[in-house]
């Protein structure tokens, strides 16, 4: 056993042996990790895997969130963002307003728009395609990471297209990849309570597979810290790992800490910092076929996200600009961070900031022409060519 590693929980010993031998962990191993309080040993192991893959680098990007509408018919108990049409606080931006917001992001140097919104009962699929076409036409250099699997399933339903044809129409309009939201916890017991009317877990996975099959990469998330059991977390992670074995289409995994304020689950306590950090580490250890684990500072807080960079995370998301979903649910973090602030956090954790585009290519601003051609890949490019010796 490595002498730097001190294990105080005997259940972690066999798991550690597997990690150090590069062996795949089982569901029981995942459970042992979740049920252990030996956070330093678990973190050491996750950091070991993280440094083997990415050295000292910490990835971030300059991105702009755009939430076209908060009107949503799903009424998920976990959510504080969705509103009924005409309810107080409900909004739907016009296409011009969306393009104007996007323009603000470009002025800030955004290389990515992260676009997700409510399941609006009246807006047609063509609205979203027009939005994407308009964005691509105006800002061809910006990557469009748009629409969760849940939105794709909804658009397929309202447009009476198959999921595959819906995805093909999105891709044709200019969508470059998909964000990872809406996965929550795949288990039907949990979904029935926290997001009853949403796309099922099975459907979420099927839509992700269909996206990957037509060359659209995506991220994946897990919403934790509400009513789920450790077994249900492990099941969720292993379902993602199975799909990734088949498609290799997931880029990044993002554990999302539940924020209960202003939701129908407001009586639940928030996840603790211990759970946040452990969840990052366990994700890194179980998801051996995911390149990246993201510590999303907006929901973890910048302080916990920074610590997560030593517990398995290699990515801290981006500058974000105008986050709404967590802030409606009581997040007290800022809605935006400057590049300088992000880089300071990363450096203070002893990591080397690496500005990336959505596909984890380096962004070289000194060489970047004012309007780059869009980076649209149909095939997945292995992300292993970066120099890790920093
Ligand atoms: O889909 C909703 C979750 C997601 C709450 O792909 C909540 O790079 C906590 O998916 N408390 C949206 N979570 C955010 C998301 C995301 C974030 C950053 C990066 C990426 C990426 C994706 O937030 C939703 C849902 O799973 N969510 N309400 C809440 N009250």
Image (tube, rainbow, N blue to C red):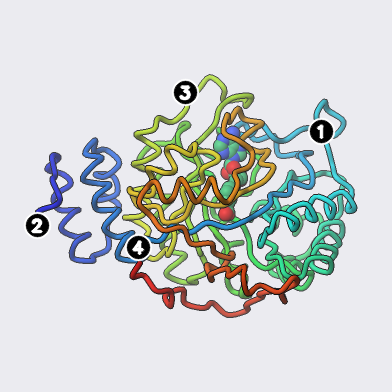
Disc 3, SS? loop
Q: Earlier in the sequence, mark 3 or mark 1?
A: 1
Q: Which mark is residue 90?
A: 1
Specify the label residue 288 is tagged with: 4
For image coordinates 51% across by 64% down, the residue present is 250
Quadrant housing the C terminus: bottom left
First of labels 4, 2 by sequence position: 2
Label 4 environment density (alpha carbons within 10 Å; few <14, some 14–19, many ≥20): some
Question: Quarter of the picture for ligand 1?
Answer: top right
Labels 4 & 2 near each other (Cβ < 8 A) = no
Residue 378: x percent and y percent?
A: 63, 79
Q: Nearer the viewer, residue 269 or 43?
A: 43
Q: x%, y% of residue 43?
A: 27, 47
Residue to which mark 3 is pinned: 269
SS label for mark 1: loop
Crowd tier of the residue under label 2, counting other residues whose Cα lies within 10 Å: few below 14, some 14–19, many 20 or above: few
- The residues bearing labels 4 and 1 have C-alpha atoms spaced at a distance of 41 Å
Residue for badge 2: 1
Identity of the residue furthest to the top in this view: 267
Distance in Å between CA atoms under marks 2 and 1: 57 Å
Q: Is residue 182 visible to us here?
A: no
Q: Nearer the viewer, mark 3 or mark 2?
A: 2
> Which mark is first along the chain, 1 or 2?
2
Circle 2/circle 1 CB separation < 8 Å = no
Residue at image position (84%, 34%) is 85
Q: Is there a contact, CB below 8 Å, between mark 3 and mark 1?
A: no
């Amino acid at each position: 056993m490595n002498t730097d590693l001190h294990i105080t929980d005997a259940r972690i010993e066999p798991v550690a042996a597997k990690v150090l031998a590069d062996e795949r962990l089982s569901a029981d191993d995942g459970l042992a990790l979740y049920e252990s309080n030996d956070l330093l040993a678990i973190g050491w192991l996750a950091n070991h895997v993280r440094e083997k893959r990415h050295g000292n680098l910490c990835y971030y990007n300059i991105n702009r969130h755009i939430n076209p509408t908060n009107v949503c018919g799903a009424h998920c108990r976990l959510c504080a963002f969705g509103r009924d049409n005409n309810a107080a606080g409900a909004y739907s931006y016009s296409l011009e307003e969306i393009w104007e917001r996007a323009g603000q992001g470009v002025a800030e140097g955004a290389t990515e728009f992260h676009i997700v919104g409510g399941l609006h009962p009246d807006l047609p699929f063509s609205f979203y395609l027009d939005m994407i076409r308009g964005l691509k036409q105006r800002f061809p250099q910006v990557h469009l990471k748009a629409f969760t699997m849940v939105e794709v399933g909804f658009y397929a339903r309202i447009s009476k297209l198959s999921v595959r044809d819906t995805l093909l129409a999105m891709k044709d309009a200019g969508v470059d990849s998909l964000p990872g939201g809406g996965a929550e916890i795949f288990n039907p017991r949990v979904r029935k309570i926290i997001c009853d009317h949403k796309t099922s877990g099975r459907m979420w996975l099927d839509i992700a597979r269909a996206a990957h099959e037509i060359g659209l990469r995506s991220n994946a998330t897990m919403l934790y810290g509400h009513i789920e059991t450790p077994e249900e977390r492990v099941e969720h992670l292993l379902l993602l790992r199975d799909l990734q074995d088949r498609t290799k289409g997931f880029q990044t995994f993002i554990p999302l800490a539940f924020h209960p304020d202003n939701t129908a689950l407001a009586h639940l306590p928030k996840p603790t910092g211990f759970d946040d950090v452990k969840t990052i580490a366990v994700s890194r250890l179980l998801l051996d076929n995911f390149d990246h684990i993201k510590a999303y500072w907006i929901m973890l807080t910048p302080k916990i996200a920074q610590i997560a960079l030593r517990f398995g995370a290699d990515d801290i998301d981006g500058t974000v600009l105008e986050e709404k979903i967590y802030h409606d649910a009581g997040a007290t973090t800022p809605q935006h961070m400057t590049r300088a602030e992000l880089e300071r956090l990363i450096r203070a954790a002893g990591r080397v900031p690496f500005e990336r585009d959505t596909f984890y290519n380096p962004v070289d601003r000194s060489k970047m022409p004012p309007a780059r051609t869009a980076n649209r890949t149909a095939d997945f490019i292995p992300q292993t060519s970066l120099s890790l010796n920093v």
